[in-house]
Amino acid sequence: VQLVESGGGLVHPGGSLRLSCVGSGFTFSAYHMRWYRQAPGKEREKVATIFVGGVGTTYADSVKGRFTISRDNLKNTVYLQMDDLTPEDTAVYYCNAYYNDALDFWGQGTQVTVSS
């Protein structure tokens, strides 16, 4: 099983980034997909979830209206479109694939830094 994130980087406040996460080694379409983030000295925070089939999404209050999660099951990929970024969004962003507590996989993370 592998989850590989990409798309992180340095962006100015107010800018945008799109993160991607490609999954392999499991039935991607059967898993709920999530993005988490962890800032230095803080606990890991769940940012967004997209459910199996893409029929529903949820967001942390801190990103509602600015971030959009989507998935393409044909490409085994989940995306996180991040707009109107602020320095408080600076963190390592992790992709997560969840089926149940025994089938719960993580990517290695991608750094997002928002700074002027």
Image (cartoon, rainbow, N blue to C red):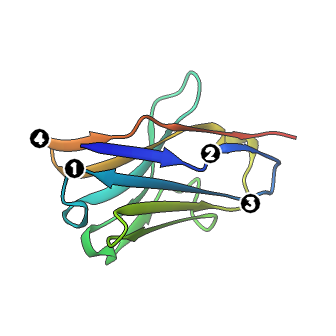
The x, y position of residue 42, in whole percent, is 53, 27
**Label whose residue precedes the other's in the sequence (3 or 1):** 1
Q: Where does the C terminus fall, quadrant-wise? A: top right
Marks 2 and 3 sit apart, C-alpha to C-alpha, by: 15 Å
**Label whose residue precedes the other's in the sequence (2 or 3):** 2
Residue that protrudes farthest toward the bottom in the picture: 55
Marks 1 and 2 sit apart, C-alpha to C-alpha, by: 23 Å
Please indicate whether residue 103 sits to the left or right of residue 88 in the image.
left
The x, y position of residue 12, in whole percent, is 83, 48
For disc 4, the marked residue is 102
For disc 1, the marked residue is 25
Marks 3 and 4 sit apart, C-alpha to C-alpha, by: 36 Å
Which amino acid type is marked by label 2? Gly
**Label whose residue precedes the other's in the sequence (4 or 2):** 2
Indicate whether 86 appears above or below 55. Answer: above
Residue in the foreground of this view, choosing between 34 and 24: 24
